Amino acid sequence: MSNWKTANRSFYYDGAPPPEDPVLARADTALLVIDLQNCYLWRRPDGIPPEVPPEWAQFDARLRETVLPRTAAMIAAFRDRGMEVIHARIACQHADGRDRSLSQKKPGWNNLLLPKDAFASKILEEVTPAPDEIVVTKTTDSALTGTNLRLGLSNMGIRNVVCAGIFTDQCVSSTVRSLADESFDVIVLDDCCAAGTEELHRRELEVLNMIYCQVMRADDLLGYLPD
C-alpha cells in the first residue's frame, strides 16, 4: 500500500494527523466516471486515426496509457462486487448549444459544443456504460449541478463516491467540491484522472486533498473494497 495518507498535501495540512481508513460497503459506495468522451482523444466516427495537437501529447499519452486502462479495471472491480457505477458526460440538448452553461460558452478551451447525439460527445468505448448503469448529462462542470445525480445518490443510499475522469482541475474538481458540500465522502483516484498538464493535475490534487476528498491510487482503493 502506498503512502496516500501523507501524499498530495498542501501546506495547510502538513501537520495534520493521517486520515482514517475508509469504510466502503457495497450498498453505500459508488464509482463516478466523469467525461471520458471521444472528443478528448480526438477520435473520429470514420475510424481515421486522430491527429493529436502537439501541446496535448502528454495528456493524450496519460489518458490512453494510464487513465483509461486503470479506470476500466476499477469499473470491472465495482461491477464484480455488485457496486454502483455511474457515468457523467458533457453534452447539450440543442444542436446549437444554446442550453449550455455560461462557462461552456466563454472563448477558449471551455467553449465546448457537444450535441448529445454527436459522436464526439459519446463515452469512450473502453469505459462504455453497462445497460443498467446511470448516465447523467451535464452542461456545466459539476456532475451534480443541473442534473438529478444528488437525488439519485440519496435514493440509492450512497454516502461514498469514488471519482475518476477528466479534467482533474475542472470537471473532476467541480464535481468533488459539489459532492463534499452535500456531505458525501469523496475519494479521488490519482491515476484514474488527468489534467492538461501533469503540473495542473498535481496542483489540483493538493488543493482538493484532505478537505474535499481523500486522494489515493487505484491499487490503494482496491484494498478497501469489500471482498
Image (cartoon, rainbow, N blue to C red):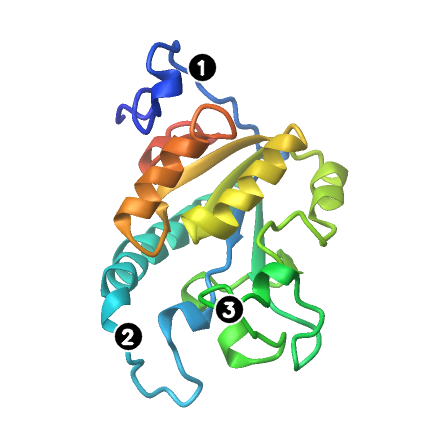
Name the residue that disc number 1 marks.
20
Q: Is residue 184 left or right of residue 215?
A: right
Judging from the image, what secondary structure is the residue with disc 3 in? Answer: loop
Residue drawn at (28%, 74%), measured in percent from left and top?
Answer: 53
Quarter of the image with the N terminus is: top left
Q: CA distance from mark 3 to mark 2?
A: 21 Å
- Residue 197: which numbered mark, if any? none
- Report crowding for label 1: few under 14, some 14 to 19, many 20 or more residues within 10 A (C-alpha): few
Q: CA distance from mark 3 to mark 1?
A: 43 Å
- Residue 107: which numbered mark, if any? 3
The image quadrant that residue 48 belongs to is bottom left
Residue drawn at (49%, 30%), measured in percent from left and top?
Answer: 213
Residue type, label 1: Glu
Q: Against 134, is 126 above or below?
A: below
Looking at the rendered image, the disc whose residue lies closer to the viewer, 3 or 1, is 3
- Residue 52: which numbered mark, if any? 2
Camera-side residue of 172 and 184:
172
- Report crowding for label 3: few under 14, some 14 to 19, many 20 or more residues within 10 A (C-alpha): few
Q: Is residue 101 left or right of residue 187?
A: right
Camera-side residue of 79 and 11:
11
Residue type, label 3: Pro
Judging from the image, what secondary structure is the residue with disc 2 in? Answer: loop
Tell me where residue 221 appears, x and y as whole percent: 40, 33
Q: Is residue 209 visible?
A: yes
